[in-house]
Image: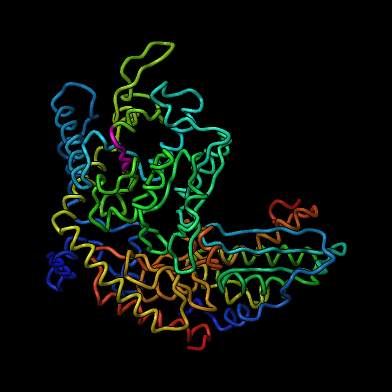
Amino acid sequence: MTVPAPALAAFSDQELARIRADFPILSRTVRDGKPLVYLDSGATSQKPYAVLDAERGWYTELNAAPHRGAHALSEEGTEAYEGARATIAGFIGARADEIVFTKNATEAINAVAYAFSNSAAGGGGGAGERFRIGPGDEIVVTQMEHHANLIPWQELSARTGASLKWLEVTDDGRLDLSRVREVITERTKVVAFVHASNVLGTINPVDAIVARARKVGALVVLDACQSVPHLPIDVADLGVDLLAFSGHKMLGPMGIGVLWGRREVLDAMPVFLTGGSMIETVTMERATYAPAPQKFEAGVPNAAQAIGLAAACNYLTNLGMDRVSAHEHALTGILLDGLRERPWTRLIGPDSLENRGGAVSFVVNGVHAHDVGQILDEHGVAVRVGHHCAWPLHRRFKAAATTRASLAPYNTPEEMTAFFAALDTVPGIFGIEV
Amino acid sequence: MDLYQELIIEHAKRPHRAGLRAPFDAEVHHVNPTCGDEVTLRVARDGDVLSDISYDSLGCSISVASGSMLADLLTGENLDTARTTFAAVRSMLTSKGADPGDEEVIGDAIALAGVAKYPARVKCALLSWMALADALAKTGVNLSEESHV
């Protein structure tokens, strides 16, 4: 008989105090001395000293161009840069040579989309066959994609003549899989979808989509921007082919992102950006390329940012990703309960903690999200307002814009109280009946 | 807070002269891509006079109120008044608070003065005004005084 594991606890007040002390920005005030309540980590998270020190340490101790030159700094710098790759790989259960550094997740997804059209143009040789796409082929996304995982595929469709299809979203903010067999077909070459929605909070059933994609031989690309920072992730368990995430949403620096790919997929994938350091040999007429991941890293890399991201992974590992997840889960519960108690709001996304992350978007009936955000800001509460780079999803829910609170390990129950106290001033200002 | 003057809330709740009307000489559709605010604006000219300004706007209280104020201020006015008002409103909104605005010139739009201190909201307040400038440009009129020679 199996005994269910005890539910993990949220961070205690003492633990939270220690965590918050690691993030200098959290102690500043905004708008005439109000304490900052930062609920916009879904857009970008704040950074602990460990990350800031790692970046600074690169420039004070190691700065040289990695993979170039044989002097001491270059050697140590290369070792640190490649060490960062290994740390980040370990964080998601991958091999180091399966980690491609990009500037962000957007670039990572574009690298894959361009691999398809470069293959269509003959790039990648025979090995690139899996990435060949053209008229009659199909690309599948979902209605809940961030523009970063939609527009690159729209453009790929326009360049190659392949058609774009999508899975729709149910009223309660889940993927509608009832038509999955009609949408993902023998003609599907690639299925690209989001793991955890940046608007709805929905965590999608990766297994079900991977199973269908495997049946038809399509490659699976997962946008993991809102899952890698918040959940324990093991790429082997997920079973996808390629996965993208950004450093700056997971306590790391801006300017660094990751494309993970299964080794044989990266080997077969045609290159996107070309130039220095991604080559094997070069003549005036042509070039051959280094093995992955180097063939995808043209130019001098963002080494300081890579090292900063590795420091962020270590910081999160020390917190424990299962604890991070449990903590954010508890706070998400407070947010959902609070919105339910306020019938003048409308939640956009699942009203349940099951398969749900910590992005909580809502509408205040009769008040535009920009106005809601402005009032919250006046109280020092930072949230995101607008369509959160998911305009088609907002149209689906007939909302021009929503207000989104999103969480990180440093958020506290008291901040949820402050958020609702500020929100409760909105109806009065706009004459909304509560 | 001083941003949400009573006048702004009133205009936003019941925008004046709202709705699209015919006849018109030009129609434009402007959006604020960061937040999804949209306005469709029509202008009808009778020679030098803006005989009708009609619009359909979807957006925050600042953008809807600003459009309502615009329609109030400029309907029935001549192009010279439109240019002066446009320049005064734009100057106030983009001044970061340095130009407090002149109620004699911009009427109710003086209530938008607080917007200038919130750079993220200036676009909201300017949306309808830029739409009007664009619509008039389609009828061959330049609303910007400085480039009007």
Residue A199 placed where, x, y %?
A: 42, 62
Q: Residue visible at 30% across and 34% down?
A: A301
Q: Quadrant of residue B141?
A: bottom right
**Above-or-below relation of A214 to A15:** above
Q: Residue visible at 60% across and 75% down?
A: B110
Q: Do we see residue A286 in this rendering?
A: yes
Instruction: Name the image colouring.
Output: rainbow
**Above-or-below relation of A243 to B132:** above
Q: Residue visible at 62% across and 63% down?
A: B38
**Above-or-below relation of B146 to A236:** below
Name the outermost residue toward the top.
Answer: A284
- Between A4 and A227, the residue placed more toward the observer is A4
Residue A424 placed where, x, y %?
A: 40, 83
- Between A382 and B132, the residue placed more toward the observer is A382
Q: Do we see residue B98 in this rendering?
A: no
- Between A201 and A3, the residue placed more toward the observer is A3
Query: On the rendered structure, is A165 left or right of B24?
Result: left
Residue B27 placed where, x, y %?
A: 75, 59
Q: Residue visible at 15% across and 74% down?
A: A13
Query: On the rendered structure, is B120 left or right of A194?
Result: right
Specify start and end residues of the magenta stretch as a single range.
Answer: A258-263
Was residue B112 drawn as part of the magenta stretch in this picture? Answer: no
